[in-house]
Amino acid sequence: MPSAGRGRLLVLFVIVLALAAFFAAGAQRYFTFENIKAQQAAVDAYYHAHPGQTALAYFALYIALTGLSLAGAATLLTLLGGAIFGLLWGTLIVSFASSIGATVAFLASRMVLRDWVQSRFGRSLETINRGIEREGGLYLFTLRLIPAVPYFAINLAMGLTPIRTWTFYWVSQLGMLAGTIVYVNAGTQLARIESPRGILSWQLFGALVLLGVFPLAAKKIVDAVKARRVYARWSKPARFERNLIVIGAGSAGLVSAYIAAAVRAKVTLVEKHRMGGDCLNTGCVPSKALIKSARVLSQMRRAGEYGLRAPAVAFDFAEVMERVQRVVRAVEPHDSVERYTQLGVECIRGEARITSPWTVQIDGQRTLSTRAIIIAAGARPLVPPIPGIEHARVLTSDTVWELRELPKRLAVLGGGPIGCELAQAFARFGARVTQVEMLPRLLAREDPEVSELVRAQFAAEGVDVRTGHRATRIEGGRTLVCEHAGGEARFEFDALLCALGRVPNTAGYGLEELGIPISKARTVETDDYLQTLYPNIYACGDVAGPYQFTHTASHQAWYAAVNALFAPFKRFRADYSVIPWATFTDPEVARVGLNETEAKERGIAYEVTTFGIEELDRAIADEVAHGMVKVLTVPGKDRILGATLVGEHAGDLIIEYIAAMKHGIGLNKILGTIHIYPTLAEANKYAAGAWKRAHAPAGALRKLERFHAWMRG
């Protein structure tokens, strides 16, 4: 039997033994109603004879137990305080004792743990620290007033933050007062029971109901106070013309509007440029069309590998780029004004500006009132302020589609997904590509061996990859100068493609006037429900982060739309537990969940199982036998923490692991699922098989070996 199973049996045995000893010793007699009342009578008698000593001893005991952070002790002592001292004196004594004890625990946590925690996790805690410095008192008051989090945990956690000691004390004193009164009152009612039948008294029942209802009521009060505070300077319309106005018609905006129309809400979608946003017009659709043309060209040049005579391949780059636009036009109706109008969405072409939490002005003229607003304004390519860049021919993922002539020499700034995809595509068309990345490797978010597989393929195709190089200036509009460990390097180019990420669009539509905060990552600051500073204004997609993918924008849009339309009656926290993505290079790289690099950084225990695609029959037949499936699992279990696939159609094959993680399916279930032979998808099953072999029960197999030897006679 595994050690964990033996441990559980041991704990169960100890519990049963303790219960048996309890009843064998007759200890249950101390918990009879008559005995409890007798003890209460003795305490009451001592209190009336020595009121000062009793109060002082109780006060000191309360401070000591609270300062030691003994879970549950404060609750029991508060009830006892009500039983002994009554409502008025009990509340007074408990209020000061609890605040002083909490401050003792707070100071102990600060003295022992704060420096260590801040030194180790300071970067992760920066946002929390800034928030505490700005509004720590209000945050603490909310936690104290709504006792959803144990008070002892709040004491210890706040000790790790920069909140001032005096602020902690007086806010605790004030914030815990309402809860103290409720609990002390319950204690007074418990003390008045004279017989077991008294448990059914309406007074006690009311006190217990108040205990249960108080946290909910307190939360409603706090929410109302916050809302009143944030909306104080605005005049709310008596009626609304719309249920929802969505700003931006990219992936997030389109899905938000679609959901609103589907549930028969009156929704207006405002877009100042083109329906479909970046994904349709300058992102996913055109880039994948270009990558496909480049891949076909590459495969034609590899005809000899398939036993064919290599043809003379000729192409016109202008025709390739016209095909890209043809694909965009073919997809365009899916995101068109006509389609969304038919679905019930009012689509307006114009520039939106939020003029109050409930009003949106369009093109400075027409103003619409709305119950809720969703900001889905997207992002734009980052062009770095490199000296001399103003004299260069600069391309971005927005403008590269205007090309009709292939640049002979292309410098690509950035080794992320966009930079890698376009660098390889242009190299396959015949451009001499130099890719510059400041970090030590391409695709820095992936594991090192994944980055190396991509780099090696790029090198084989003639891409000059320069990692560890930082662009410092551009000379003469055609020379990129970079610093690296060995000194300085210079690269000639005809066009410079900036692929250094995207900057959220947060200016020009009213956020500044409303005071809606922007995060350190320059995204609109939102909570777990995608609400901004104003509870009826939401943000989703690239403008909100933390991921800038079309599929995550759509995912967030569901939460934003449902919450905007149905709050406060029902709302949902955005779920980021299973987020996948893919980079459409050759080989493709796809990932979901943790990879090994992240698991190490976060100190998460894991096991790694790897299956090399060079062993896969279909990959061998298709001449694509390179890449791998790499799965992280919980040690000793088949539960999947994350998976990375590198190879042909990795973006499609990762779906099995996405579904498995979403629905709690482990590697054993994947292994037990029939996969068609011969397909690339078998790689997932073989990876599960590799995990199974590594966890084969050695002892049981030895016994089976002896059994089969005995059967042979």
Image (cartoon, rainbow, N blue to C red):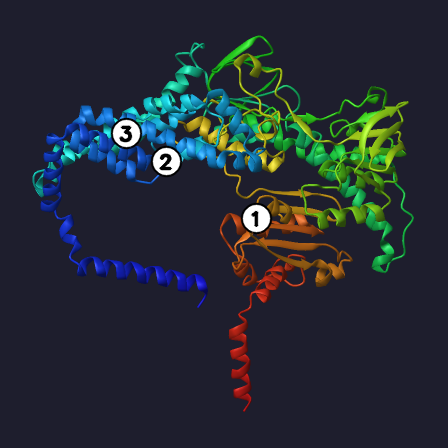
Q: Position of residue 107 (x, y in %)?
A: 42, 31
Q: Which mark is residue 239?
A: none
The reply, left or right, for residue 40 in relation to residue 1 is left
At a point 64% along the width and 60% down the height, the residue shown is: 682
User: Where does label 3 land, which residue?
Assistant: 214
- The numbered mark, 1 or 3, whose residue comes first in the sequence reads 3
Tell me the amino acid under the disc marked 2.
Phe
Amino acid at circle 1:
Ile
Q: Amino acid at mark 3?
A: Phe
Asked if the residues shown at circle 2 and circle 3 are in contact, with their CB atoms under 8 angstroms apart, the answer is: no
* Alpha carbons under labels 1 and 2: distance apart: 39 Å
Residue 125 picture location, percent across and down: 54, 32
**Which element is circle 3 on?**
helix
Q: Which mark is residue 658?
A: 1
User: Given this view, does label 2 or label 3 mark the residue nearer the observer?
Assistant: 2
Q: Is residue 250 above or below residue 241?
A: below
Disc 2 designates what residue? 152
Q: For the residue carrying disc 2, how many other residues have a C-alpha within 10 Å: few (<14), some (14-19), or many (20+)?
A: many
Residue found at x 65% / y 27%: 277
Identify which residue, 441 or 154, lies in the foreground. 154
Q: Earlier in the sequence, mark 2 or mark 3?
A: 2
Residue visible at 22% across and 34% down? 79
CA–CA distance in space, label 1 to label 3: 41 Å
| Residue nearest the observer in this picture, 184 or 440 | 184
Which mark is in front, 1 or 3?
3
Residue 213's image quarter?
top left
